[in-house]
Image: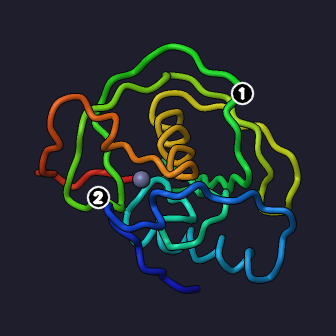
């Protein structure tokens, strides 16, 4: 178990496209374990590999604290509806902003054992999936914020 250093807005590694994962290696397995540890330690609900400085298409998401999802090479195949609400990011500490996202998404990916999986999410899970997948293409929620970025006043989940 290891906590990795979370990269922050403005760092070059957050602006790049992450690369497909071709095979599971001990090193990648360790990365995934560390990403989960780092996300939980930071009270986040999601984390992308580039946020710990690794340009691989891997995200971890857990919106309830007891249901971790590992998504490798994820791809959104269906969306519907719309939700508008506050969003945050572990790479933009202390800030929050209003972003509109689909209210439902379906994603196909590989799991931590490189097996194909499908994951459907609504509300917070749908938002987290969209947010984390944006990271894999070098995009961040601050590009999509409606209005101003605000300071976080209460303790809230960040992605
Ligand atoms: Zn983020």
Q: How is the image coloured?
A: rainbow
Q: Residue 66, how many percent across, how many down?
A: 56, 56
Q: Label 2, on which residue?
A: 92
Q: Position of residue 115 (x, y in %)?
A: 88, 53
Q: Is residue 8 positioned above or below 25 on the image?
A: above
Q: Looking at mark 2, is its residue's CB closer than 8 Å to ligand 1?
A: yes
Label 2 environment density (alpha carbons within 10 Å; few <14, some 14–19, many ≥20) = some
Drawn side of residue 91 relative to residue 23, left or right = left
In the picture, the quarter occupied by the N terminus is bottom right
Task: Measure the alpha-carbon separation of dots 1 and 2.
Answer: 28 Å
Q: Which sits earlier in the primary sequence, circle 1 or circle 2?
A: 1
Q: Which mark is residue 9?
A: none
Q: Residue at x 21, y 55 (%)?
A: 155
Residue at figure coordinates x 76%, y 45% from the top left:
109
In this image, 126 relative to 5: left or right?
right
Q: Residue at x 47, y 35 (%)?
A: 127
How far across and how far down the image is residue 23, in percent? 87, 67
User: Does the residue tagged 1 have its C-beta within 8 Å of any atom of ligand 1?
Assistant: no
Whole-percent x and y of residue 114?
A: 86, 58
The answer to whether residue 149 is left or right of residue 136 is left
Secondary structure at badge 2 equals loop
Q: Nearer the viewer, residue 20 or 111?
A: 20
**Depicted 55 relative to depicted 109: above or below:** below
Residue drawn at x 47%, y 29% as measured from the top left: 123
Read off the residue under disc 1. 77
Count of marks placed on residues: 2
Badge 1 local density, few (<14 within 10 Å), some, or many (20+)?
few
User: Secondary structure under badge 1?
Assistant: strand
In the picture as drawn, the residue positioned furthest to the top comes out as 81
Whether residues under marks 1 and 2 lie with C-beta atoms below 8 angstroms apart, the answer is no
Residue placed most toward the observer, 88 or 123: 88
């Amino acid at each position: 178990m290891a906590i990795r250093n979370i990269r922050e807005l403005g760092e070059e590694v957050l602006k790049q496209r992450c690369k497909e994962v071709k095979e599971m290696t001990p090193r990648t397995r360790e990365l995934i374990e560390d990403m989960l540890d780092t996300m939980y330690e930071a009270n986040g609900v999601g984390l992308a590999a580039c946020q710990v400085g690794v340009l691989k298409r891997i995200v971890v998401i857990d919106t309830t604290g007891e249901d971790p999802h590992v998504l490798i090479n994820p791809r959104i195949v269906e969306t519907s509806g719309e939700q508008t609400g506050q969003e945050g990011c572990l790479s933009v500490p202390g800030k929050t902003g209003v972003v509109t996202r689909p209210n439902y998404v379906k994603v196909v990916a590989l799991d931590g054992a490189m097996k194909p999986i499908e994951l459907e999410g609504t509300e917070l899970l749908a938002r987290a999936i969209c947010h984390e997948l944006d990271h894999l293409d070098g995009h961040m929620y601050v590009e999509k914020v409606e209005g101003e970025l605000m300071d976080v006043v209460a303790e809230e989940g960040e992605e």
